[in-house]
Image (cartoon, rainbow, N blue to C red):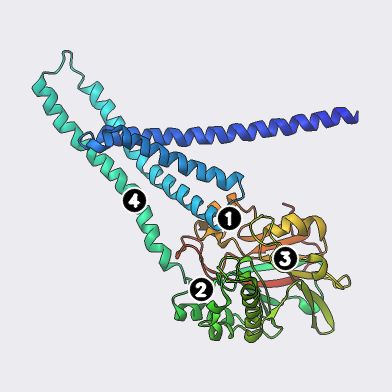
Amino acid sequence: MMTTWMTIVINLQILATIKEGLSWLLAIAALLIIDFYVLSGIKGSFKKWRFLQKKSFTVIYWIFSCLIITGFLLVVFSRLEFGIRMILLALFFLDLLFKICFVPFILIDDLRRTILYFKNKPEEPLTEKQSERSSQFDIPRSEFLMKAGMLAGAIPLAAMRITMKNELYDYHIKRQTIYLPNLPKAFDGIRIGQISDIHSGNFFHKRAVLGGVEMLMGEKADLIFFTGDLVDARSSEMEDYLDIFSRVKAPLGVYSSTGNHDYGDYADWPNIAAKNKNLADLITTHKNMGWDLLMNENRRLKVDGEEIGILGVENWSELSWTPKRGRMDLAVKNTDDLPVKLLLSHDPSHWRAQVLPQYPQIDVMFSGHTHGMQLGVRTEHFQWSPVEYIFKEWAGLYNQGLQQLYVNVGYGFFNVQGRVGILPEITIFELKAATSSPLIKC
């Protein structure tokens, strides 16, 4: 009987794999058909442009298209470095956006040609003079439609380019209520602020950065979390912004954790001693700002005689190219008696990979890292970003059973000096006690 059930399970897994494989083959086929249609439209409508009619152009076009598609597949199925994956995703979706805007104009032109063909189809072949006159009338109109199509494809890209820098410092506040069945009465209604991913080495507008900090402080949160990536590569990047972020204070404290960029792994060092000193300097920076940096440790937060736990781990990622320094075994030490445990862990992949299966006592994990790829759509009821092909949890609140995860899309930026649709975030949480949690299992 057991063997029969195992056979059924294996067969179902095989069918699911085949179904997924067929879905990907259909998606790739659709992309290639779009590419073929765009190429034929360009070559058919710009016959006077000799370069477009050459085989070399066709070869270059297909090489570029295949590289774009291959890059996207590598993002989905391989473990490339996070920054490279973001760049490949951005190229793929920008290319796709252009083609999606361009294709309707090719369709219109093809429809126009078809209607003209059947409407004016001659019973006898056209004379050379008639053919020349028809050609002179027809080609410019096709060229007009193709140029209009290219313009339609270029306008969204140009608009994105303009928007990119406009939204870099457009800080906004996201408000989120967290329901916790075991929350002590003294903590019911407590307000927590969160920022993440400052990446100070990329800033170029101190006044705008200060404006975001002032927004955070204006919320008068009871305590504040910072969830990693204070710098981009070197601790010295904080020198110009130390005075600004030293203003981040809260009555019950500011608690912070480290992210993958904080260890100096993305900079060249003359020796290991220099790299170690960089990390020591970064730890000192947290201390100088008055932030309590939690490196695989915890704090007992006490209000009116009742306590909850604030835990923090060093960077721990499911992805192979970022450091796994986090030690949950140390972070949870001596916290068994605490009714609520809040965890600061930079990378959201840590939640599903280790926290959920091994640490059910963690009530809420606070993360950052994804930046929402700095590209996408995020509204109150809908969100999408290409980064979801890398991270299952990439922005906002998630839950499984009674455990929750919140992913902040970042205060700063890196790799690309721009944001489109995914604004820099300051999150304000309100903790609420609940006799029956409204959480839905995901």
Left or right: where 118 falls relative to 366? left
Residue identifier under label 1: 81
Mark sitting earlier along the chain (4/3)? 4
Separation of marks 4 and 3 at Cα, in angstroms: 44 Å
Q: Secondary structure at mark 2?
A: helix
Q: Earlier in the sequence, mark 1 or mark 4?
A: 1
Q: Residue 430: percent from the left, percent from the top?
A: 68, 72
Q: Name the residue type under label 2.
A: Gly
Where disc 1 sits, the SS reads: loop
Among all residues in the image, which is located at the extreme front? 271
The answer to whether marks 2 and 3 mark residues whose Cβ atoms lie closer than 8 Å is no
Real-space Cα separation, disc 2 to disc 3, in angstroms? 23 Å
Give the residue number, with chain letter if any, for mark 3.
Answer: 325
Residues packed near mark 4 inside 10 Å, few (<14), some (14 to 19) or many (20 plus): some
Spot occupied by residue 362 in the image (x, y as percentages of width and height): 79, 65
Label 1 vs 2, first from the N-terminus? 1
- For marks 2 and 3 on the same chain, the one whose residue lies earlier in the sequence: 2
- Residue corresponding to mark 2: 201
Amino acid type assigned to the residue bearing label 4 in the image: Ala
Relative height, residue 70 to residue 242 (above, below): above
Q: Position of residue 124 (x, y in %)?
A: 16, 13
Note whether residue 182 is visible: no
- In the figure, residue 316 lies in which quadrant? bottom right
Q: Secondary structure at mark 4?
A: helix
Neighbour class for label 1 at 10 Å: few (<14), some, many (≥20)? Answer: few
Residue occupying the point 51% across, 45% down: 71
Which residue, given by chain and number where applicable, does mark 4 sit on?
A: 154
Question: Mark 1 or mark 3, which is nearer the start of the sequence?
Answer: 1
